Amino acid sequence: MEEARALAGGGGARDDEGAGRLGPVASEFLSASVRHRQRVRRIWQGLVAVLSALAVAVAVVGVVARVQSDRARQERNIAIAGEVRAEADQVRMTDASLAAQLDVVALRMQPTESTELNLLGDEDTPLSTVLTGHRGEVNTVDFSPDGHVLASGDDKGEIWLWNTAGPGPRAGSAIRCGVSTSRCGECTTALPDTSSPPPTRTAPSAVGTSATPGTPPPWVTRSRRVAAGSTPSRFAFQPGGRVLAVAAGPEVQLWDVTDAARPRLLGSPPGHADDSFLSVAFTPGGDTMASGNSDGTVPLWNVSDPSRPRLLGRPLSSGSGGQINGVAISPDGRTLVAVSNDGGLRLWDVVDPARPRPLGGLLTVSEDPVNSVVFSPNSHMLATSGDDAVIHFWDIRDRTHPRHLGQDLTGHRGTVSALAFSSDGRSVVSGGSDRTLRLWDVRDPDHARPFGMPIVVPDYINTVTFSRDGRTLFIGDGSYTVRILPMTTRSAVAYICRSTGNVLTPQLWHKHIPHLPYHPPCAQP
């Protein structure tokens, strides 16, 4: 082009009128050059378009291939996870440790609700540790506010205190106190035999039994055994954690458990021989205590000085003739609730405990006895259960007009005597005479639903309580034990690996999981 322009400027005829005009040769050359340049541009544009289309096609093919590969991998994992679960089921009765580790492998391959629940229940039997030592049915358990002490009581009148704060096992001493009314009799202390080395940890021989009979898990230490005289129906820790209140027949006993290894009886509120206290609860501040009596009343006491409890006015009347099976005080401290043997529920305002006032009238929950009542952590909701095998939920944001929520939860085949909310309020656990533990998703209380399949335990369930962090459930049952059940997949996997070690050897891996390279779930890094 530059050459054409030079030729045009220097050649051709020139005169005053035709100065600057191109000659025919130069004009044709210049036009040809322009056409060539446009043709080259079109060729490049077409080439870029073709390459762009190819790139898009390759990307689409790559995405499709990746999606298909991921889908194929997912389908393969689902299939292999199913095979692994089947292998676990085959060895579950003969080698519980191997079955548990195969469940962990299946969870790693297919982290779904069903595989998570397999870690909590093998063959519908809980993967649990047991605390042994009770000589009767365990009917009540509770945690101290700091989570360091677990108390468990049985129908023989004994309460065990367990130290759950230690990093490893420590032998504890046991104390037996014969208690009648409010007087402590002779006490004897039994020190542990430390001449023998601690037992070697072994894999559980069967699901639902401890690895070494009578030995608690590494972080639970038996501290003291306290006899409460009468059967402790229920007990509760004072929010400060220093005092344990025990509803024990004709009296409510107050124990100083500041030193859990040396509990001492402080005394009992005034009572009489006809009383039969079945439940007890504290306000969040710890200064007021309520208890449910078999005569249908709920006395309130000032326990700011636990050694000198003082009755606050006349006992509250539930308005029914049935005994009070359970009492609870809301986490915000404003509301007291009582449930009775004739199926009734009653609320009181206890903002001023010295002047409690009823909220609305007596509600009929069921034609059968109501045994348990619990508040949600935000104090907005109540859950009740009893002999009708049904769990009912109530919205109490308007405390004078409680509203029944959604559909009642059914599934149990007998009395539901154990009920608890998780610490985040998103789930409820229930247990009862049908020997099943059921988990319920209550994030939407109007549409509550079961979470997975029920977990079956060896005996009927009397009581349940969550650890303060919500990761562990403690279950008191009719087999004289407290069962410890991990409630998160992380804690379940940690428990399996801690209890069983690396039992999934390369030989066992290739026998049960031949499709995958060796990658045991509990191998030490």
Image (cartoon, rainbow, N blue to C red):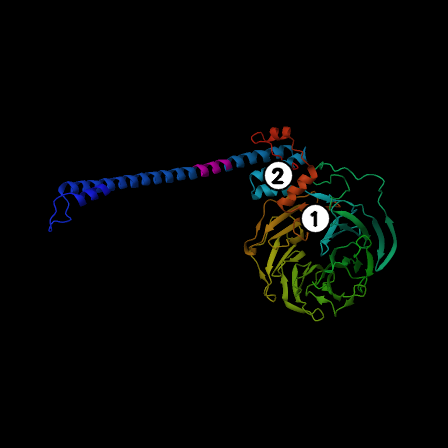
Please, is residue 263 above or below residue 435 in the view? below
> Label 2: which residue?
104
Q: Is residue 312 above or below residue 76?
A: below
As shown in the figure, which amino acid type bears the numbered disc 2? Val
Dot 2 falls on a residue whose secondary structure is: helix
Q: Is residue 238 magenta?
A: no
Query: Chief secondary structure of the magenta span?
Result: helix
Which residue is drawn at the image coordinates 56% and 43% (left, top)? Answer: 112
Relative to residue 58, is residue 452 drawn left or right?
right
In this rendering, does residue 162 appear at all?
A: yes
The image quadrant that residue 353 belongs to is: bottom right
70 inside magenta stretch = yes
Mark in the foreground, 2 or 1: 2
Towards the viewer: 472 or 344: 472
Question: Which quadrant, please, contains the N terminus?
Answer: top left
- Classify mark 2: residues with Cα within 10 Å, few (<14), some (14-19) or many (20+): many
Magenta stretch? 65-73
As drawn, the label of residue 475 is 1
| Left or right: 523, with 163 as reference point | left
52 and 98: which is toward the camera: 52
